[in-house]
Image (tube, rainbow, N blue to C red):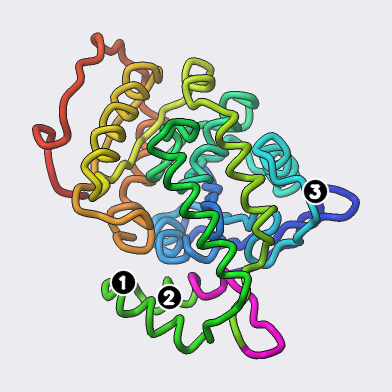
Amino acid sequence: MKTFRIPVSASVSLNVRHRPAAGPGAARRPYLLLHGMLSNARMWDDVADRVAAAGHPVYAVDHRGHGESDTPADGYENAAVVEDLVVVIAALGLADPLIAGHSWGAHLAQRLAAEHPDLVSGLVLVDGGWYEFDGPVMRTIWERTAEVVRRAQEGTTSARDMGAYLRAMHPTWSSTAIEARLSDYRVGPDGLLVPRMTSEQVMSIVASLQREAPVDWYRKITVPVRLLPIIPAVPRLADQVRAWVAAAEAALDRVDVHWYPGSEHDLHAEAPDEVAADLLRLAHDVNAPPVDRPAARVVPPESRRQGRG
């Protein structure tokens, strides 16, 4: 694994983690992996290892304010972060990359494909890209998130205690994923964990998401798209997710949906084998000729083919 520093402005450089393709697959399409809000590129490590082993070069970027990238005072709106990605793709010389985004990263990936169609050959959206953030359901969630972020600034947990908590909460996660989640924080002078961004910077990302509607991008995306949604445990939100995914499926030109029932938001940490397989299926979809789709029919997840893989 290699790392690069990519300057995206006079004062901001981003960290990129790179895994060369294993074996004779260097000519295969590269993947660019985008993490979610308050996350980092290392969360993709388990998936990236599997995709690189299948012959694809893989790059995972730390967005500004996250991971090992610089943390400027501002510039966290989606438009600015997408322009960062345009610079990264050019600097790395990526030709027709496949883009996979998790959560906020899925929204960024979708906007990138809509605004810069010549830079993207396919998308995998991992539990994100269809959420409408300005409705009453999500507004309540964001209010709670703001309070959690504010309290985290106080730095009351050590790395050891946080690691124990994560292992208890996520017993199926690898040690790689646990360490990746811990790197969302920096260690303060008192040995306690502190978030890398201020609460104001975090909420500026939220405000940017609230100003955008995924439907604004759907009709502008012409590349193959794979949606990987979970079904939230909260019934009200689960019903809303089904409706959002159905709307995305109806509007996108070339789309396939793989539901992950009973899974958690960090799919790439919980089910790296299945998520890697979905990323590799995208490469197949991109190379397959497009077919005419019949009119979309809303089918509840329970009646679809269940399971993963």
**For the N terminus, which image quadrant?**
bottom right
Residue positioned 58% across, 35% down in the render: 96
Magenta-tinted stretch: 180-191
Element type at marker 1? loop
Q: Nearer the viewer, residue 145 or 186?
A: 145
Labels 3, 2: front one: 2
Mark sitting on residue 195: none
Residue annotated with mark 1: 170
Q: Position of residue 247 (x, y in %)?
A: 34, 21
Rendering coords of residue 152 (x, y %): 56, 70
Distance of label 3 from label 2 (alpha carbons): 29 Å
Residue holding disc 3: 8
Eye-nearest disc, 1 or 3: 1
The numbered mark, 2 or 1, whose residue comes first in the sequence reads 1
Question: Does 181 appear in magenta?
Answer: yes
Check if mark 2's residue and mark 1's residue have beta carbons within 8 Å.
yes
View extreme (right): residue: 10
